[in-house]
Structures are given as C-alpha cells and as structure tokens.
Image (spheres, rainbow, N blue to C red):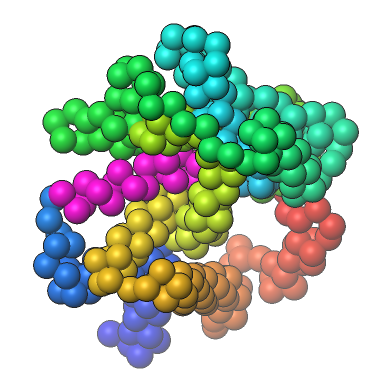
C-alpha cells in the first residue's frame, strides 16, 4: 500500500471519528457525569432516585420541547414562562372560583397557554415585531396580569382539588409518574412531527432560510402562528401538571423553567452535525440538567455553591461540544479543496480547478446558498 493511500485511509478514519465525537461527545460527557455521581453517592443509582430525576424534569421537558419547535422555526419564545403560569392559573381558578369540573379546568388551562401563543403570533406575524421583542413584551404583560390578578403575586392554594386533577401531577402507573408518561408521549410526538413529517420539514426550512421558504411557496405565516400557539399549549400543559402536583398556583413560578429549557435546547443543538435544534438532543439536555441537579443535591452542596457548579459544568460542556463541532465542520469543508488539489484530479472529463472554484464565490452572496 502506498504512502499516499495510507494517509488517505487514516484521514478518512480521523474524519469519521471527528464526526462521531461531534455528534456523541456530549452524550459521552453525560455518561461520565453519571459514572461520577454513581461513585460519589451510593443513593444515586437506586431506582427510586432515578425515578425522582425523571419526575423532576418532566415539566422542564415539556417547556424545552415547545422551545425546540419554536427555535427550529427560526424564532424564540421568552414568554414560555408566562404560558406555564397561565396554564396553572386558569386551571386552579376555574375550579376554585367557578366550580368547573377538573377536565374542563384542564381545557381552560390549555386555552390560557394558547392565548399567550396567539398574542405572540399576532405581534410577530400580524405586526412584524421581531420574535425576541414580541415574546419579551408578552412576558412583561403576562407577569403584570398575574400580579394584578393575585393582589401583588400571592399564591393561590386549592387543597380541596379533585382527585382526578391531582392524579395528573402525583399519580403513577406501575411506579412511573403520570407527568413522566405525558412528557415521554409529548417527546415522541414532537420528535415525529419535527423530524418525520412534511410539516416538520417546513418548520425547519423556515428556520434555515425563511425567505427561501417563502419563495418555495410555503405558507410561513400560517406555520408560524401554529408554532407559537402550539408552544403556548405545550407550556401550559406543564403548568397544569405543576399545579396538580402542588395543589397550588404561584405567580411567576414558570420563570424557573425558562432558562433551563433554553439551555437544554442549545445543548441538543450542540449534538447536531449542523448545530440545529432537535428533539433527541433536547431530551439529552434536559436529562443532563436533571442528573446534574440531583447529583449535586445528593452531595449536600450549599444552594449557592450548587448553582455556581451547575453553571460551570454546563458552560464547560457546551464550550467543548461546540469547539469539537466547529473543528469537525472545518475539517469537512477542507476535504473538497484537498481532493481538488490532488495530482491527477483534473483528469479526463474532470472540471478545471478554476471552473470548480467559481461557484464558491456565489456562496457569499446575500441570502446564502440555494
């Protein structure tokens, strides 16, 4: 075997390894985290503790899935926290103050989240406000509405909540919590929608190149409305589960899920070859955050120290993941140039180097590639 062939072979192996690390590097870091906590605490791998981890991240997963769809469409939703609160608020108040049956209360809670999504859609699609500013404005409006409706932010307790309602938040099937089952079903459903259906292709096309999607004939305005309304409903479902488990509605409680949900979405994006939001990556990101929080609790760290450690670990993991991904993409982009520069590459029937390079200049035109 010639030296050139040997180098080519090892170059291919190295490129394949880099691609694997790019895609699964964060999963490896997650596995190492699990191994560390399993040695640091005897209670970590106990089934009851693992179920506690799943119970603790179920609501966060619903919010993160909603943001995954929104970010895939090219937007952002800072009002997801308000949608969580409105789901809990509408459900609790409709039962406690108006005597609604709990199934009707659940539907009204979902309607509360849909109203938040509809307001976002009106601002973004109808008035042309950028998603960041529109959803930030909705967040402030929703926060003020909660403070006004609860006399400054007082919690609303409903200890006499119906058993059917509380079962949603604290019931289980064969030891697995109902919130975990609902979150798992939502993850499978959103995953199929986003990655296996024409609707998901359209949503991702909007996120990659919105103007190209319009030119291609996609009804981007209608899709964007459905995305934001659907995200509001999904977040409200998380709020309903939260209120069902606590028999309580606390204004602004949803904000505690917002930043972690955004982090989970971008953790998942760091695992994608093209740094795109994706449901499997979001699930891994949510589990990573849940395991990290649970493991630090088992170690008995002070609350303030725990928050600092969480931030440092998350930052290091993301920096490493994105660094590896960028190097792998840079190596992949260099491959065509190396192949074109090899002796004999411009043989019979091959395109001349100048002609092959000509289309590259078009890639830098405004609007990107076709």
Q: Is residue 52 left or right of residue 85?
A: left
Outermost residue, bottom direction?
3
Q: Is residue 37 above or below residue 255?
A: below
The residue lying at 22 percent from left, 30 percent from top is 172
Number of numbered labels in the structure image: 0
The residue lying at 14 percent from left, 31 percent from top is 174
Q: Is residue 13 visible?
A: yes
Q: Give the magenta range.
A: 48-69
Asked whether 56 falls inside the magenta stretch, the response is yes
Q: Is residue 176 left or right of residue 364?
A: left
Q: Is residue 239 left or right of residue 31?
A: right
Question: Where in the figure is residue 10, as x and y percent of width and height?
Answer: 34, 81
Question: Where in the figure is residue 142, as x and y percent of width and height?
Answer: 70, 37
Location of residue 243 by image quarter: top left
Foreground residue among 335 and 345: 335
Asked whether 27 falls inside the magenta stretch, the response is no
Location of residue 199 by image quarter: top right
Outermost residue, right direction?
127
The residue lying at 58 percent from left, 71 percent from top is 333
Q: Is residue 228 visible?
A: no
Foreground residue among 155 and 171: 155
Q: Quadrant of the N terminus?
A: bottom left
Question: Where in the figure is residue 47, as x and y percent of width and height?
Answer: 13, 50
Location of residue 229 by image quarter: top right
The residue lying at 38 percent from left, 36 percent from top is 246
């Amino acid at each position: 075997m010639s030296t050139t062939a040997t180098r080519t072979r090892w170059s291919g192996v190295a490129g394949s390894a880099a691609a694997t690390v790019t895609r699964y590097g964060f999963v490896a870091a997650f596995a190492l985290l699990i191994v560390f906590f399993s040695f640091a605490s005897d209670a970590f791998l106990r089934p009851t503790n693992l179920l506690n981890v799943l119970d603790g991240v179920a609501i966060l997963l619903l919010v993160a899935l909603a943001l995954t769809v929104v970010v895939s469409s090219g937007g952002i939703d800072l009002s997801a926290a308000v949608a969580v609160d409105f789901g809990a608020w509408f459900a609790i108040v409709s039962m406690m103050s108006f005597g609604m049956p709990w199934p009707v209360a659940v539907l009204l809670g979902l309607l509360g989240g849909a109203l938040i999504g509809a307001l976002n859609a009106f601002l973004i699609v109808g008035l042309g406000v950028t998603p960041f500013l529109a959803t930030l404005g909705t967040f402030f409006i929703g926060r003020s509405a909660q403070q006004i409706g609860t006399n400054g932010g007082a919690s609303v307790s409903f200890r006499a909540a119906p058993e059917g309602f509380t079962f949603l938040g604290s019931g289980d099937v064969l030891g697995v919590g109902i919130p975990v089952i609902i979150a798992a079903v939502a993850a499978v459903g959103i995953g199929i929608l986003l990655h296996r259906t024409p609707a998901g292709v359209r949503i991702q096309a909007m996120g990659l190149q919105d103007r190209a999607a319009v030119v291609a004939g996609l009804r981007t305005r209608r899709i964007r409305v459905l995305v934001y309304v659907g995200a509001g409903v999904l977040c409200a479902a998380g709020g309903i589960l939260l209120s069902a488990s606590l028999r309580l509605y606390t204004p602004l409680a949803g904000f505690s899920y917002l930043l972690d949900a955004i982090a989970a979405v971008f953790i998942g994006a760091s695992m994608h070859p093209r740094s795109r939001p994706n449901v499997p990556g979001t699930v891994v990101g949510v589990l990573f955050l849940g395991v990290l929080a649970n493991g630090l609790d088992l170690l008995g760290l002070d609350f303030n120290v725990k928050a600092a450690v969480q931030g440092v670990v998350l930052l290091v993991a993301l920096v490493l993941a994105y660094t590896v991904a960028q190097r792998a993409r840079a190596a992949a982009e260099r491959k065509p140039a190396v192949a074109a520069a090899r002796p004999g590459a411009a043989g019979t029937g091959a395109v001349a180097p100048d002609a092959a390079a000509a289309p590259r200049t078009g890639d830098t035109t405004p609007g990107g590639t076709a």
